[in-house]
Amino acid sequence: MTDAKQILQRYKAAESIRLAMHSIWRDVAVHADPLNREIGVDTATGWTPSVTGQAAIFDSTIKEAARIYAAGCMSWMTPSESKWFAFNAPRMFRQDDGIKAWYSECTDIAAEILVGTNFYSEIHDVYAQDGPYGTSGLFIRENSTFGLHFESFQIGEYSILENNLGDVDTVFQVKKFSPRQCLQEFGEKVLTEEVRKKLENPLTADDETIEMLQFIGPRNERDRFSRSIQNAPIASVWIEKASQTIFKESGFYETPFAIHRHLKWGRCPYGRSPGIEALYDARQLNYMQQQLDTLVEKQVTPPVIAPAEFEGVIDLRASGVTFTTDMSNRPQYFGNPGNYLVGEDRTEFRKRQINNCFHVELFQALASVPIGKQMTAEEVRQRRFDRIPNFSPTFARKTRELSDPIMRQVFSTLLRLGAFPPAPRQLVQPLPNGEVFIPPPNIVYSSKMALALQSIHNDAFVDALSLASNIAQARPDILDNLDLDDGFRNYARNAGILESSLVPEKSRDQMRMQRAQAQAQAEQQAAMLEESDAVAKLAGAAK
């Protein structure tokens, strides 16, 4: 039987690790996410939106950089308007056209379902938290309406633990429910007497908050032959923190969450972010921008020095008149020795540093040619090539910790819900306990970012081919070093061409063989015709 106290003890240990990050996250939020600067503050009595935190902000470069980063990841990795993933058949089944077609159909169904869910709004929120804080996550569960429901974890409201491999396998999520929401989420039977009383009172049914803790992690003790959801390998337990009462116990057959760390931070389970890297520059830039604003303000309305008898009588309004009987003793403006251009130059340096941390120039380079600048196709290619490698480690971690777990869970959940057509019989694998198993797909990404990273290999192939072509004028055999067939097919795949558009290698070889045979036959016929003509001419000459 699940022990609520034991789960709460584990939560306390995980929470202590998270609390050490709160001060860092708040410092970043002050500049990059000022509306979320109260991270970790107890909101048991509710949360009132406030913009007072923006009063001390004089520069929004880091906030704009975080916005561009989130929008860039959304547009170039998981765009809602185009297909960015594919379920491919496992390697052992890739020669079977029926199985390949089934996985392809599953891809189309999953893509259509995702558009109808809240996935794209929630994944954007994941990216929006990744930039400033370096740790983000998405929770995936079944939904009776669309089949899938997604929920981004909010920074400061969840704690994580890693397994022996350094992967996050346990999440503790604290959520606040009203009594009415508790009824909707957990049902009436499990509600405590105190919650029932609040639910019966119209004044407290929607206004009072109940703090709940959800534990999601491996179930250590279970009957491996039972398919009951309470015996699923991943446990899900909801506990009311005040009464330490278990409201709901269920589970998942696969890990229902994806936790992403932008960069690992030593042995800490939480990540290091662009926002943390850019924090020093953001602080300095904010201070410098404040000084420049002060300088501009002094230039527009410069300070005045005046004799004591003018106190309260100087008219500083436009067209205002100040009267004096002694022009030699009149009020005067102070000198203003500040140099705005020098300060502006330093602020531009800080802005570049911040934008570099958030890969702003990369996303701008991928998007278009800078306004007002003429560039050749080669210049555009080189502009992108120079910046893409810096994003490659980030893309690799996002693929492993975010995209792969999400898409594996999407496939498994939709398969279990019957959203896909029946699988080919040869794909279904029997298990010793009498159940069946369908191999998970090989997930391939075709987003613009994935293709842009793959295009690096294309550039290398084109450069090598160009060099070899030049050398071939003197040494034709130099081309023997290149497998042009393999190089072209990889080039096409990296460029995003559909696999169905490529002729299978066996078919290609057969066409070449048939072409060679036809050409040899034509040459043979031509030779025979030429020989018969020669014989006829000789015979005519002999007469």
Image (tube, rainbow, N blue to C red):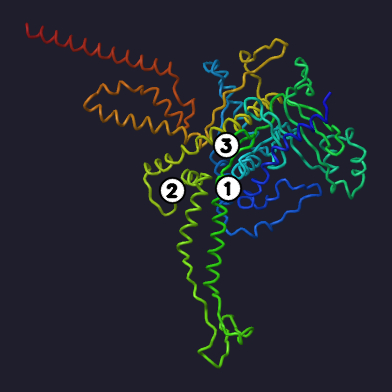
Name the residue carrying label 2: 369
Name the residue carrying label 1: 66
Q: Nearer the viewer, residue 470 or 515?
A: 470
Q: Amino acid at mark 2?
A: Val
Question: Residue at left 39%, top 41%?
Answer: 382
Q: Amino acid at mark 1?
A: Ala
First of labels 2, 1 by sequence position = 1
Which image quarter: residue 108?
Answer: top right
Q: Nearer the viewer, mark 3 or mark 1?
A: 3
Give above or below for 237 relative to 338: above
Spatial CA distance of label 2 from label 1 is 21 Å
Give above or below for 253 relative to 200: above
Question: Residue at left 57%, top 62%?
Answer: 290
* Quadrant showing the N terminus: top right
Q: Secondary structure at mark 1?
A: helix
Q: Secondary structure at mark 2?
A: loop
Q: Secondary structure at mark 3?
A: strand
Q: Amino acid at mark 3?
A: Leu
**Image x and y of residue 301, in percent:** 55, 74
Name the residue carrying label 3: 263
**Image x and y of residue 208, in percent:** 85, 47
Are the residues flagged by discs 2 and 1 in contact, CB closer than 8 Å? no
Q: Residue furthest front?
A: 308
Question: Residue at left 38%, top 50%?
Answer: 374
Spatial CA distance of label 3 from label 1 is 16 Å
Q: Is residue 106 left or right of residue 45?
A: left
Numbered tag placed on residue 481 in the rendering: none
* Quadrant showing the C terminus: top left
Q: Is residue 497 left or right of residue 322?
A: left
Neighbours of disc 3 within 10 Å: few (<14), some (14-19), many (20+)? some
